[in-house]
Amino acid sequence: MSDVKKFLYVNRKAPYGTIYAQEALEVVLIGAAFDQDVAMAFLDDGVFQLTKGQDTKEAGLKNFSPTFRALGDYEVTKLYVEQESLDERGLTLDDLQDIQYEDEDDDYEEKPSIIVVSRAAMADVMADQDVVLSF
Amino acid sequence: MAAYDVNGTSVEHDEEGYITNLSEWTKELADVIAVAEEIEMGEEHWAVVNFLREYYEEYQIAPAVRVLIKSIKKSMGPEVGNNKYMYELFPYGPAKQACKIAGLPKPTGCV
């Protein structure tokens, strides 16, 4: 399996207002079909993508936030969230959706997909990738 | 734009047969789409269609075929959730055909 590459999709923008967030998620879901090691990173306003209780009715847009909870089905199980970006926006882990995946190697136990990391640790995560795609 | 005819009411669909307004779906429409897809809807077909509608309701996406089969295996068991059986039910692709009949968009990750 030496041909498996590590892909990181970096999300820096708020979920609505531009199409970047929704398109990025779509690309991740499509890319997940190719059996690569796929992870996502959320920093800057990108952390808003994962917040709970999004309601887009008034804006007339599709609320795609529930789709993040399907990522586990697509074997995308690592969602790195930058601590400093949360702090700067007055958010905590409690403001984010509870996103889990079933660990096939551990009797299908449900485990959290969100991994909160410091800015320094996020730099290490990025450095460790074969491919980094920014949205 | 082409449309399905359900007892005199027309429901628009795209060039591949997926309906354009998801809220226009009814069970009667599902039967009409199934006829166009040359599928005779039995209980097993309905189980898959209903499963897909629930999946969409919860996650706001139509799952890719391998995700669909894996999820069906989990909720209905391996005798239903396997490639062979699912392709017997929907010969032109379980995700594509079942999503179309369920009134969902084309599956995400269906390349």
Image (cartoon, coloured by chain):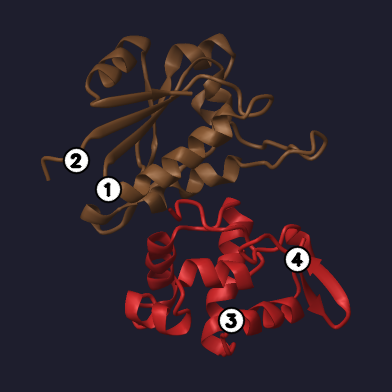
Label 1 is found on which chain of the structure? Answer: A
Of tags 2 and 3, the one toward the viewer is: 2
Residue linked to disc 3: B46
Of tags 1 and 4, the one toward the viewer is: 4
Label 4 is found on which chain of the structure? Answer: B
Labels 1 and 4 positioned on one and the same chain: no
Of tags 1 and 3, the one toward the viewer is: 1
Residue occupying image coordinates x 75% and y 66%: B2
Q: Amino acid at mark 3?
A: Trp
Chain A visual colour: brown
Q: Amino acid at mark 1?
A: Asp
**Numbered circle sitting on residue A4:** 2
In the rendering, at what x and y percent does residue B28 appear? Answer: 75, 81
Q: Are marks 2 and 1 in contact (CB under 8 Å)?
A: yes
Q: What is the C-alpha distance between the residues marked 1 and 4?
A: 37 Å
Please, what secondary structure does the residue beneath circle 4 have? loop
Labels 3 and 4 positioned on one and the same chain: yes
Q: Nearer the viewer, residue A95 or A67?
A: A67
Label 3 is found on which chain of the structure? Answer: B
Q: Amino acid at mark 4?
A: Ala
Q: Are marks 2 and 3 in contact (CB under 8 Å)?
A: no
Residue linked to disc 1: A35
**From the viewer's perspective, is A44 left or right of A131?**
right
User: Please, which residue is most extreme toward the right here?
Assistant: B8
Residue linked to disc 4: B2
Chain B visual colour: red
Residue occupying image coordinates x 41% and y 84%: B88
